[in-house]
Amino acid sequence: MLTPSERRRAKVAVLMAVNAVPLVGVLALDWSLVALLAVYWVELGACLVGAAVKALFAEGKPVYDANGFSWLVFGALAEKRGRIGLPVLPLSIQVANLPAILIALAVGSVGWALFGAIGVGGVGETTGATMTDAESLSVGLGVLAVIFGRAVDVGRYVLSGTYASVPPQQPLQSALVSMAGTGSALLIGGGFVIAGAPPPFVLAFVLAVKLLADIVDVYRDRLEAYDERTSVELGLAPDTPEWERIESSRDGSDIVRPKPSAVVAGGVVRGLSSPLSVLLAAGLTLVGLLSTATTDGVAVELLGGAVVVAGAFTALGVFDRSFRYLAMEYRIGDEGVGNGRLVGYDRLLGPQWQLPGEARAEMERARTVTDRLFGTETLRLERDDRVYRLPHLSSDAVDIAPPRSNHQLTNGRSGASSATNSETNSFAGDS
């Protein structure tokens, strides 16, 4: 295991080698400004992809709140704990890392396209410069060298075991900060060229800003340490929570499971009731109906689009609910051995959460639309800033909640309100 100083020196060596490529191209191979910006633009994309690979294997607990990440499908991934092993490599993928990676890739891709359009495309159009065959070949070799440098950085991260102690946000944030620095150099440099600044000045500016951004990234850990030991809050101190230890055993435990058919049907309701699904499908249908008076074909295409949107969200909803609950079982420990503790256990990914026996008395009992169709009931509990949801249980299984709690919440207006809110607020996220 490398020390922080050794990791820093290794990273400096890699970054110096990566930054030497465009510098040699400018000084020795007579690269144009467009060629330099093109290499930097490719490096931005390689940096983002490398960070996504690092985050994929990171074993630290994600620092975002799963309840605040409860979008369709994304929420199902974010609230799951557990890892999927790779068949060949001694590595595994943490399911909860995927939402942060997907969002970082989406945001980074938009920025990458913008930097390329203005920083590279704008400069090329303004100057009218084109690369010669020799320059194109050297730039291609430079691109390969940059990609190789980023691959070496990822390999060092894996071989040194760094992934075992970092949350997925750490490499993603580092990459986005680096992209912001280099991307700013591309945008401002492109603006200088469009404004008529001399190319040598723009070259020096881009090289200086790029090198400064990389140096800041290398010494980010020292800034984080300074943030931790002082009262000055820079927002750089890492937040690295640990996974809660869960002890779970089937011995001496009653086990209840959701009804599979109800889980799938609930997924259909979840997908079709998504606000985005309702908005898109209703909008396409309305425009299609209004266009029937003037155009014969448009209405059919728009109505067909509404059907496709509804079908797509139905599939997403079924995946969301199935991934959340289809493999779940709820283990109720014996009062004498397990103190009545309730453990949510995923048969594919392992234990997910646990609640003390007294928490069962606080559970709310509700019947959603799906529950009424399949003769099941749903238990729900808000505790420790998290929502625990045990959906579509049979009437016998619902007895895991004490009778007093059941009676209190199935009579009167509060019971009806709970049933309605449990179904209509499903978009906000269910644990």
Image (spheres, rainbow, N blue to C red):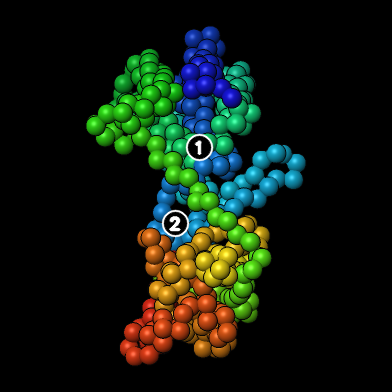
Compared across the picture, whether 233 is left or right of 97 comes to: left
Q: Residue 256 occupies which quadrant of the picture? A: bottom right
Residue 131 x/y as whole percent: 54, 23
* Lower position in the chain sequence, tag 2 or tag 1: 2
260 lies above or below 232: below
415 and 404: which one is in front?
A: 404
Q: Secondary structure at mark 2?
A: helix
Residue furthest to the front in view is 336
Question: Residue visible at 52% across and 66% down?
Answer: 339
131 lies above or below 61: above
The answer to whether residue 240 of the structure is visible from this angle is yes
214 and 358: which one is in front?
A: 358
Residue furthest to the top in view is 28
Distance between mark 2 and mark 1 Cα atoms: 18 Å
Q: Would you call the spot at circle 1 few (<14 residues within 10 Å), some (14-19), or many (20 or more)?
A: many
Residue for badge 2: 66
Q: Secondary structure at mark 1?
A: loop
Residue for badge 1: 166
The answer to whether residue 42 of the structure is visible from this angle is no
Residue 127 x/y as whole percent: 41, 26
Question: Residue visible at 52% across and 21% down?
Answer: 3
Residue 253 x/y as whole percent: 62, 69
Residue furthest to the left in view is 231
Q: Are marks 2 and 1 in contact (CB under 8 Å)?
A: no
212 lies above or below 430: above
Residue 57 x/y as whole percent: 59, 41
Q: Residue 320 occupies which quadrant of the picture? A: bottom right
